Image (cartoon, rainbow, N blue to C red):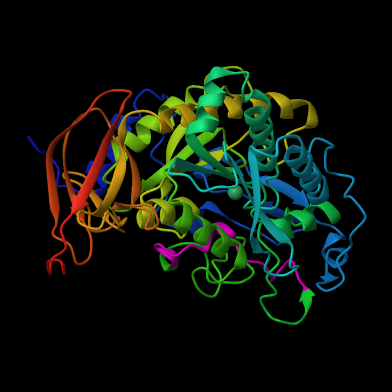
């Protein structure tokens, strides 16, 4: 019996609450307007900030005394300070050059397991944006399921890079010693972008973090050649091309400024291009803070994979204890009406992409960092194991020539006009798709080929059903 109409906000709310009913902390207070997550009051000497990607109840207002820092933090874009380190940054966080040194060290120690690629160049300072892949035969691209871990979209949220580097270290040092880690590295291609926003990160390190708690990149919005924290910068997690104009803010001075156009920023284009090429199955971006895993999505048409998306988030969250020692991370929906990375990843490519809001503050104190990182590495381990679990994989090719094909893998009952289907990788024809245990009907669709329907594909729990699918060209073959 259906009591409420499909896709009504109430029905959707009930379905989400039912899915995550194990979590006593869930509140239905997400907002239809992402802007409402944020307020800034400049009437007194204090700036009242309440901002993040998570629903506002996880973000206590921060009272930041700006005092004299406004004038000091204005600097010529072309003459950034290189040497000094903001003394307010705990030693647990690494400056950009220290992060690069750590990656160099891993590359030298484990040359067969790591591949490093400059996936882009930052918008304003021209800094490299690094992508690092860990896999056996790391320098080759193999037919393996791929996962992405990214950190530091937002400058004031540095712990994501700590988690990425710790996970990289654990995977490399455990390879050949730990059975599970060896299996993951052999069977997966595990990508990292530890710092998505190097410009903003460097700004935080070299200037005061107490104002303006810098979040965005350093885009010179008014083109005057000088960085003005009250006007410049684009929120990289509002710049993706999926429901872009519905979310963020169109005012350049806003913390949530979405940019002049979708993908206007080098940083988001770098992630976009890597994702289009690698066709990730799961993605994670580490933000801070809120001790929660945010999934795509709430307050937009229901994601067809919602129950599996929530199932994976819930199991991951169960492995990440809160700092207090009481309970684990919460699971909450993202706002679907905003150009965030996860919304584009899922809507455009059906990547199961999550935001993990780490910890209880932007810069957790140094002594808390090791345990926070360790908990989140355990959460990531669950995803690596799940990548090899229940689902389907295989290849689509021209039945006659055996040439690999770019094809859509449609699963009946999981199709939706507002979300693209999983697709194969055109060079290999390979595809991966996570599913729940069950019987499925697949439809394989490629331009110029007859659609192929595979009824009764059985997916067993914990197993990956392998399918080799040949398609017949519509216009026949020339012999
Ligand atoms: Zn963030």
Provide the major secondary structure of the magenta segment. Answer: loop
Please tell me which residue is depicted at 68% across the width and 26% down the height of the picture: 173
Residue at the bottom extreme, as displayed: 224
Question: Outermost residue toward the left?
Answer: 1
Residue 340 visible in the shown view: no
Left or right, 1 with respect to 93, comes to: left
User: Could you tell me which quadrant the C terminus lies in?
Assistant: bottom left
Residue depicted at 47% across the width and 57% down the height: 277
Magenta span contains residue 164 = no
Query: Which residue is found at the position 38% from the left and 52% from the top?
Result: 428
Is residue 20 found left or right of 443 in the rendered image?
right
Instruction: Please name whichever residue, 97 or 138, is drawn nearer the observer in this view of the structure.
Output: 138
Toward the viewer: 15 or 377?
A: 377
| Residue 448 appears in view | yes
Indicate yes or no whether the magenta region holds residue 238. yes
Where does the magenta region start and end?
227-244
Quarter residue 198 falls in: bottom right
- In depth, the one of 8 and 447 nearer the eye is 447
Measured from the top left, where is residue 334 in percent x and y?
Answer: 43, 46
Q: Nearer the viewer, residue 348 or 434?
A: 434
User: Which quadrant: the N terminus?
Assistant: top left
Q: Is residue 6 left or right of residue 269?
A: left
Image coordinates for residue 122, horizontal then vertical, percent? 68, 64
Q: Give x and y (percent) for residue 126.
A: 73, 68
Query: For the image shown, how many numbered marks are present on the structure?
Result: 0
Q: Pick out the residue farthest to the front.
A: 479
Task: Using residue 103 as the reference point, say whether residue 283 is left or right of it.
Answer: left
């Amino acid at each position: 019996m259906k009591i409420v109409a499909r896709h009504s906000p109430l029905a959707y709310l009930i379905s989400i609450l039912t899915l995550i009913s194990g979590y006593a902390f869930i509140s239905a207070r997400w907002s239809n307007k992402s802007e409402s997550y944020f307020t800034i009051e400049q009437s007194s000497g204090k700036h009242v900030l309440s901002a993040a990607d998570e629903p506002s109840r996880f973000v206590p207002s921060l009272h930041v005394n700006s005092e004299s820092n406004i004038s000091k933090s204005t600097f010529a874009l072309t003459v950034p300070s290189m040497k000094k380190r903001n003394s307010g940054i705990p030693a647990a966080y690494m400056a950009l050059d220290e992060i690069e040194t750590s990656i160099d060290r891993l590359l030298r120690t484990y040359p067969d397991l790591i591949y490093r690629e400059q996936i882009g160049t930052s918008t304003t300072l021209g800094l490299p944006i690094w992508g690092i892949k860990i896999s056996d035969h790391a320098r080759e691209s193999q037919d393996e399921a791929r996962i992405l871990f990214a950190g530091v979209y937002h400058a004031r949220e540095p712990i994501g890079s700590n988690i990425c580097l710790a996970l990289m270290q654990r995977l490399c040092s455990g390879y050949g010693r730990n059975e599970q880690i060896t299996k993951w590295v052999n069977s997966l291609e595990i990508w990292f972008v530890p710092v998505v926003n190097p410009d903003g990160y460097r700004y935080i390190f070299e200037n005061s973090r107490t104002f303006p708690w810098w979040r965005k990149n350093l885009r010179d919005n008014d083109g005057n050649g000088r960085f003005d924290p009250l006007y410049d910068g684009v929120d990289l997690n509002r710049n993706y091309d999926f429901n872009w104009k519905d979310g963020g803010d169109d005012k350049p001075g806003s913390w949530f400024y979405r940019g002049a156009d979708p993908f206007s920023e080098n940083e988001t284009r770098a992630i976009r291009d890597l994702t289009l090429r690698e066709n990730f199955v799961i993605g994670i971006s580490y933000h801070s803070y809120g001790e929660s895993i945010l999934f795509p999505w709430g307050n937009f048409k229901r994601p067809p994979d919602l129950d599996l998306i929530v199932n994976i988030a819930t199991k991951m969250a169960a492995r990440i204890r809160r700092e207090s020692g009481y309970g684990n991370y919460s699971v909450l929906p993202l706002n679907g009406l905003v150009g965030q990375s996860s919304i584009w990843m899922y809507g455009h490519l059906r990547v199961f992409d999550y935001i993990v809001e780490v910890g209880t503050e932007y810069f957790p104190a140094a002594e808390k960092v090791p345990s926070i990182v360790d908990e989140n590495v355990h959460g990531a381990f669950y995803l690596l194991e799940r990548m090899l679990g229940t689902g389907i994989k295989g290849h689509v090719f021209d039945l006659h020539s055996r040439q690999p094909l770019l094809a859509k893998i449609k699963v009946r009952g999981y199709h939706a006009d507002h979300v693209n289907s999983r697709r194969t990788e055109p060079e290999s024809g390979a595809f991966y798709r996570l599913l729940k245990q069950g019987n499925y009907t697949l439809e394989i669709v490629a331009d110029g080929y007859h659609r192929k329907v595979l009824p009764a594909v059985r997916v067993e729990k914990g197993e990956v059903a392998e399918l080799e699918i040949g398609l017949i060209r519509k216009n026949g073959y020339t012999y």
